[in-house]
């Protein structure tokens, strides 16, 4: 995550690679990808909004993918990440808690 934050100027391209890799990952590894994104986005806020801007369009689909590919425990962990993001306003005013709807 530190490497990604250091290279924040390439956040958009790196976020796309992250999204593609998450989509290809086995179900058991998808939650780890979400935790990685969470760490990057939260810690990168100190340096600017590059990562939040890059991830805001990709994160809803990724969260639904992780939640539906795992068991109930995985879905609850995704909901917890979303609650934390919402409480900390990681993505500004984006409706984070509704990302699993639909």
Image: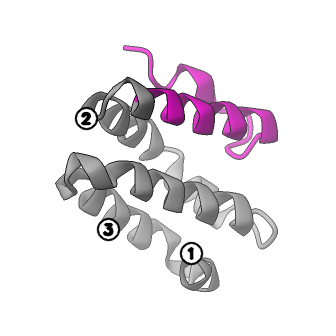
Q: Main secondary structure of the magenta part?
A: helix
Task: Please name which of the two marks, 2 or 3, marks the residue nearer to the observer.
Answer: 2
Asked whether residue 91 is drawn in magenta, I would say: yes
Q: Which residues are magenta?
A: 75-102
In the rendered image, residue 59, in percent from the top left (x then y), is placed at 46, 44
Pointer 3: residues within 10 angstroms few (<14), some, or many (20+)? few
**Left or right of 34 on screen, residue 50:** right
Q: Position of residue 70 (x, y in %)?
A: 29, 34
Inter-mark Cα distance, 1 to 2: 24 Å
Image quarter of residue 5: bottom right
**Label 2 vs 3, first from the N-terminus:** 3
Numbered disc in front, either 3 or 1: 1
Residue 35 horizontal/vertical position (percent)? 52, 55
Spatial CA span between label 2 and label 3 = 19 Å
Residue 92, position as x, y percentages in the image: 74, 40
Q: Residue at x 19, y 53 (%)?
A: 26
The residue singled out by tag 1 in the image is 1
- Mark 2 and mark 3 in contact? Answer it, CB < 8 Å: no
In this rendering, would 72 be left or right of 25?
Answer: right
Q: Secondary structure at mark 3?
A: helix
The question of residue 68 being in magenta is answered with: no
Q: Earlier in the sequence, mark 3 or mark 1?
A: 1
Which badge, 1 or 2, is on the more N-terminal residue?
1
The residue under label 3 is: 17
Task: Classify mark 2: residues with Cα within 10 Å, few (<14), some (14-19) or many (20+).
Answer: some
Quadrant of the image containing the N terminus: bottom right
Name which quarter of the figure residue 66 lies in: top left
Colouring method of the image: one colour
Which numbered circle lies on residue 69?
Answer: 2
Label 1 vs label 2, nearer the camera: 2
């Amino acid at each position: 995550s530190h490497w990604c934050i250091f290279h924040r100027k390439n956040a958009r391209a790196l976020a796309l690679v992250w999204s593609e890799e998450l989509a290809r990952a086995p179900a058991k590894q998808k939650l780890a990808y979400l935790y990685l994104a969470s760490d990057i986005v939260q810690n990168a806020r100190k340096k600017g909004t590059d990562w939040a801007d890059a991830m805001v369009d990709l994160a809803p689909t990724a969260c639904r993918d992780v939640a539906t590919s795992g068991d109930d425990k995985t879905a609850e962990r995704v909901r917890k990440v979303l609650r934390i993001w919402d409480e900390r306003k990681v993505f500004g005013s984006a409706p984070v808690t509704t990302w699993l709807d639909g």
